[in-house]
Image (spheres, rainbow, N blue to C red):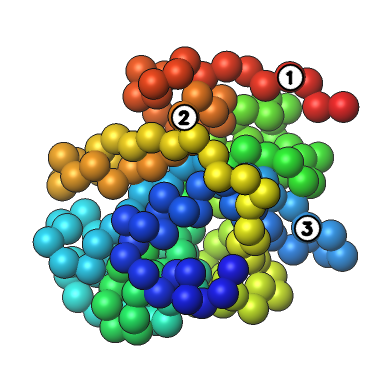
Amino acid sequence: MPRGFYDRSPEIVAQELLGKALLRKNGKNWMGGWIVETEAYLSSDDSSSHSHRGLTRSNASMFEHAGTLYVYPIHAKYCLNAVTEKKGKGSAVLIRAIEPVWGIEQMTERRGLADRRRLTRGPAMLCQALAVDRGLDGADLVRGSEITITNNQRPPETTSSCRIGISSAQELPLRFFIDGNWFVSGKASDHRRRPSKPAPRS
């Protein structure tokens, strides 16, 4: 994706990331899948955003150019974000879940389980499956030598809700996801269409 794609408000980028492919380099191959769930974090008036406390050593990547990867630790695991807007703004999109497609065997090994639905259904699970840690903090998603996001083939049917898993500013409707997708985290009741298990992959 070009840098201009990310150089917009996080609400717009969060919605338009849905259906695009998140890819992580794994030796000579790539592993990853379709992005099915995101959350926007704003540069102002958002107490749950890491930029709310200002620029620090740990969140510096969040204030970098649009298209930068911001990775932060949580409970000995990690979450990954695509930085949005101009340098210095401090806004980003958390990628909460993907539908695993490529490199499932490698992701299964990293997660230590065989349930495809649980491989990448949540931000920390996603990072563990794709071997994303603070070593990738500050990586360039646009150049994409180790991790990147590519365009989708068709726009998915999406919906939104309040963000989940946070302790403040929960009321902001900044969580976006593919409606009825089996791999979205959270409650089935958040969907307009009940999530259904996909057909076995050939």
Q: In whole angstroms, how far apart are the C-alphas of marks 1 and 2?
A: 17 Å
The answer to whether 158 is drawn above or below residue 191 in the figure is below
Taking 63 as reference, is 127 left or right?
A: right
Q: Earlier in the sequence, mark 1 or mark 2?
A: 2
Taking 79 as reference, is 60 left or right?
A: left
Q: Quadrant of the C terminus?
A: top right
Taking 49 as reference, is 62 left or right?
A: right
Q: Amino acid at mark 1?
A: Ala
Residue 182 in the image, given as x and y percentages of width and height: 56, 25
Please name the residue that numbered disc 1 is placed on: 199
**Between 1 and 166, the one nearer to me in the picture:** 1
Q: Earlier in the sequence, mark 1 or mark 3?
A: 3
Taking 23 as reference, is 74 left or right?
A: left
Q: Residue visible at 35% across and 84% down?
A: 87
| Res 179 label | 2
* SS category of the residue bearing label 3: strand
